[in-house]
Image (cartoon, rainbow, N blue to C red):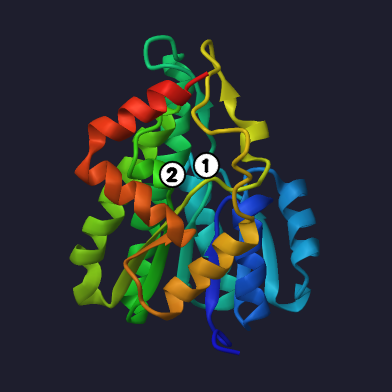
Amino acid sequence: MELEGKVVVVTGASMGIGEAIAKIFAEHGASVVLLSRDAGRVEAARARVGQEDRTLALACDVRHREEIDRAIGLTLHHLKRIDVWVNNAGHGLLDSVARMDMAAFRDMFDTNFFGAVAGMQAVIPVMKQQGGGTIINISSVAGHIPLPFHAGYSATKFAMNAIGKATNVESKKDGIHVLTVCPGFVRTAFSENVVRGNELKRVRPASVRGISAERVARATLRGYLKGKREVIVPWTMHVPVKIYQMFPGLVAWTMGKMAK
């Protein structure tokens, strides 16, 4: 077991990618703390993960720093340390920039981005004191390629990519590593839970099925064990990311044609 003795905390762990990450780290020997704003749902996820002798479920809304501090305090009380902190909590907003509700946009930023930053600020002192650790930010390919009608969501992920990569440089001297994970489309309940605004268009073809949350979790674990700075999953998404970097107009034209 590569992770025996490690303590891993996962936000947004009540379903989807967060639950899959909690499960794979627990299966590889880590003690895992699952966090979610819904206490009942995260406890149910803990039961599905199994390994109940090495898992703990806590209610935590990452929009509130005091709840993050409470979760960290309870983790340290029960498990004495935090080796890996996974920022996964988040949701989407489907709307155009022209018509999206600003309150919904701010709420999404509070969870997706500011919640992640608050988690980093809360856990970095703990990791410094214990001599190191790893922060894993679950971002998105949408943090490399801005998606029409998901622009607000893309903005949170562009911001997460930037702050994670900068923090990786800043914290290296303290033995703290930051891994940014960028999945493409993933088959989870994420789409069902997206906040729907006024213009409900999409640019993803219906024929694209996406990858499983378990595949993202496996890529995350590999990236952690190999000390990667960034993981893009599936590997085929490297192609559109590179094409966008080189020919942004072509990608924008294509997405404009696909929007419906």
Q: Position of residue 50 (x, y in %)?
A: 78, 70
The residue drawn where x is 23% and y is 45% is 245
From what the image shows, is residue 174 above or below residue 243?
Answer: below
Image location (x, y in percent) of residue 140: 43, 47
Residue at 53%, 10% (x, y): give it. Answer: 198
Residue nearest the observer in this picture, 255 or 88: 255
Residue at left 51%, top 72%?
A: 221
Does residue 195 appear anywhere in the picture? Answer: yes
**Toward the viewer: 166 or 39?**
166
Task: Give the tally of numbered discs.
Answer: 2
Residue pointed to by mark 1: 90
Mark 2 or mark 1, earlier in chain: 1
* Residue 74 visible in image: no
Q: To which residue does mark 2 refer?
A: 115
- Spatial CA distance of label 2 from label 1 is 9 Å
Q: Nearer the viewer, mark 2 or mark 1?
A: 1
Q: Position of residue 13 (x, y in %)?
A: 63, 54
In the image: residue 136, left or right of residue 32: left
Residue 11 falls in image quadrant:
bottom right
Does dot 2 land on a helix, a strand or a loop? helix
Contact between marks 2 and 1 (CB within 8 A): the answer is yes
Q: Amino acid at mark 2?
A: Gly
Q: Residue at x 28, y 78 (%)?
A: 175
Q: What crowding class fits label 2: few (fewer than 14 Cα within 10 Å), some (14-19), or many (20 or more)?
A: many
Above or below residue 180? Residue 258 is above
How far from the left and from the top, in percent, is residue 132?
A: 34, 78
Badge number at residue 178: none
Q: Amino acid at mark 1?
A: Gly
